[in-house]
Amino acid sequence: MVTRRHFILATGATALLATTGIAIGAEAAAEAPVSGGSLTWAVETEPSTLNPHLNGQAKAKLILRNAYEGLLARTPEGGYVSWLARSYSISDDGLEYTFKLRENVSFSDGEKFDAAAVAFNLERVKDVTYSTGNSSGHLTHVREAVALDEHTVVIRLARVYSPFLDGVSGIEILSPKSFSSSQLKSGGPEIAGTGPFIIDRYVKGQEIRFVRNPNYNWAPENAGHQGPAYLDEVIYRFLPESAVRSGALSSGQVQVIEGVPGNDAGLFRDDPEFSYQTAINTGTPYTLYLNTHHGLTADLTIRKAFQASIDVDQVLQSVYRGERLRAWGILTPADTDFYDRSIEGAYGFDVKLANRLLDEAGWSERDGDGFRVKDGKRLTIEVVQSQATVRDQRDILLQAVQAQARQNAGIDIALQYVDAGTYTTRQKDGQYGIIPNSTTTQENGVTIYFHYLPRDKGGSINYSRTEAPQVSAWLDEAASTLDPKKRFEIYAKLQRYAIVEQVLGLPLYVPDDQIAASGEVKGVGFRPFKRLPENAYDIWLQQNA
Amino acid sequence: MTADNVTTLGHAPVASYRRRHFFARGGLPLQVLGRIGSGMLVLWAAVTLSFISVQLAPGDIVSLLIGEQIRTPEVEAAIRAEWGLDQSLFEQYVAYLARLLHGDFGRSYILQTDISALVSSQMLPTLKLTVAALAVAIVYAVASAVLTAGKRIPRSIAGGLELTLISTPTFWLGILLLYVFSFTLKIFPVSGDRNLSALVLPALSLGLSLGAVLGQVLREGLERALEEPFALTVRSWGASDFVLRLRHGLRHAALPAVTLAGWLVGNLLSGAVITEAVFGRPGLGRITVDAVLSHDMPVVLAVAILSALIYVAMSTMVDILYLLLDPRLRSDAGRAKT
């Protein structure tokens, strides 16, 4: 139902946009957005918990961001604009961050949003007994968070830590009252945020329904509009099967889907009744990390030979039909802050090199199956992939890599799909040749630290297990400076070292997100900078005349 | 009673029923108590075995909960304390048993929710699906058996159809049904557990293959029954062929099919996993698979115990159904008593 108030707010917001001349796209400018209506969006992944502090799933963000918001929003160029915080400043020594908060903001349970609430949230998130490290990582170096006055928060750090601003500005602020709710850990309607929508009903295994927050008036500065959301309600339906999502959209039972497999992309892209968009993810590409401390991959020659034996372009073409972008570096090209493009083409497929390296290393004999052997032992590299995280046809991709390694260089790639428990044990003990992985939510270079610091010094996902002292020294140097240019140079140096010189990993492709929507759905798209599907705030439904 | 007119599947329960009845000379209450006691014992064994096997499963739960975060002793200690993992294994076991007696299955590692609430909220959709699938199966099996038993051409058509249904993967059948009836004809909605029409396609995709198996067994039984002397007697009364099949033959033929159905219903849970995923339905199957994949042991444990409970209940029910279906068993038992 569209109340008069909504209508006035909506028209007011539209008028404001028109007069201030904020670019809102040619199509939208031609037709004013209308309020009202209900949207059903079929998603692939159901959130494990609805508490944004405890949920580490990148795929759940598009749902949770309807109800929970952070202090600052990012711009496509990597800058920061106001959201729940009006402005921020960093002291000259880089140790003190001051946030001036927006006034007249309230949580959906009626509580007031103020400096005390922010300080309380940061304190709780930093406490590992509550957040068990899920989002506390960014707050490790926080000494204290203090509410200076009603609308000013000061955060003091123990050391200069350059990824801090990105990390802290993304932490969702919950109503302090929520922390005493019995739903705290599982999340739910009792956990109130400040978002443009409010969780109304959650049916596990089926759907989650949000209703509009009528009081909402604090959208990020760079959002498509201001004031309350256009939609009356939005329902996210959990449909894990991609074929079923595609069918549900094409038969008009849902209006938006995400996660469109390569084979179905053409169905929506080439049909004028639908819109189809993709965006590559930030973070790290899907990379085969080679274990430098165990088995044959400990030998640099074998790592180099493996890298040269895989024709990545051909593998991607055959598996994804050109629907996926090849990756080259330690970050994806979407990471506009720190991705150094000069790595592209700096290494690559070279059958002769692969075979020469292996011949020289003494792997010159072949067994009956065509695999190389040395001293009666086959050249086998074991790939350990967690069954739970196989998606996006990655199992087929790995098979294609396996076939290439065998055909081009006689390398035996043994694929092992394991349960979560086995995976954790193998990962912890280092009993693997290769672990494939990609990450999406650790921006601003943070992911580099998790991947390349020694495991006992914060390298929680250091799959290559490198402990090279120069790498640690570089990373420390980059973390201690707030100069982005200097950080870029250091990460570029590390990228060359890790991928070209040491072959700690072989990047395969850049994961992306896909959204397909029926024609009447307007304003659906991706978040600026982080490139994940955006929440439903700017979405509106075109009325068919 | 001769063994000729009962297939081998019918033997074991008949024999066990006799034995039990013999044992029950001490009186009915004692027999009932014995049943409950042995049921409890089976459940306790299931709980204990499940608990042990969960402990034996690979993967340290603390590492798993830390996942890919930074591991510090504080995080580790916090996790151990939160989930009671700082106690000895025996203490954990006793605490778990005590909580079970209060109907508390604990909290999920991954979903962070109370498992009793989780399981009970997922139970109803699964139960609905199971009952609907069973209804589909029974209707299909009875219709197919009664209409085609002993008739050469219909029989081979039905047989071929059943073979196709049995060998069609549930997953594919589900997508096919969706494609035809939801995406193209738009008769039924694609997903969810919202109304009766949303139940039709999942029930068909799960129930048809079950019905096909039952149909084959039932037809076989019916054909044997129709060759029995009693069939000739009934015919001589002037009863129509249809009445003979439905009223007299089916009862004879039902025993092995009921045994099989009891066993298959237990298996529906595993079939439900796929059906629930394809149709986006809530249900126990999906949370079970998710829990196994993500090593969410409290949920795995709860589902294992629940399955044991269901199996115990089902086997008792099948025993009772036998008595209702076959009066010969009752009279047999009566004779044994004297």
Image (tube, coloured by chain):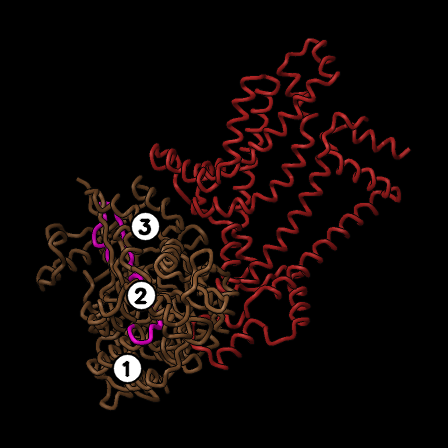
Chain colours: A brown, B red
User: Mark 3 — on which chain does it sit?
Assistant: A
A451, above or below B321, in the image: below
Q: Quadrant of the C terminus of chain A?
A: top left
Can the viewer see residue B197 in this picture? yes
Which mark, residue A308? 2
Is there CB contact under 8 Å for labels 3 and 2?
no
Badge 1 marks a residue whose secondary structure is: loop
Is there CB contact under 8 Å for labels 2 and 1?
no
A127 or A407, nearer to the observer: A407
Three-letter code for the amino acid on which mark 3 is drawn: Pro
Q: Position of residue B39 (x, y in %)?
A: 73, 51
Badges 3 and 2, same chain: yes
The label nearer to you, 2 versus 1, is 2
Q: Position of residue A261 (x, y in %)?
A: 32, 50
* Residue A410 sits in quarter: bottom left
Whichever of callouts 3 and 1 sits on the residue coming sooner in the sequence is: 1
- Magenta span: A500-525
Using a 10 Å C-alpha cutoff, classify the residue at mark 1 as few (fewer than 14 neighbours), some (14 to 19) or many (20 or more): many
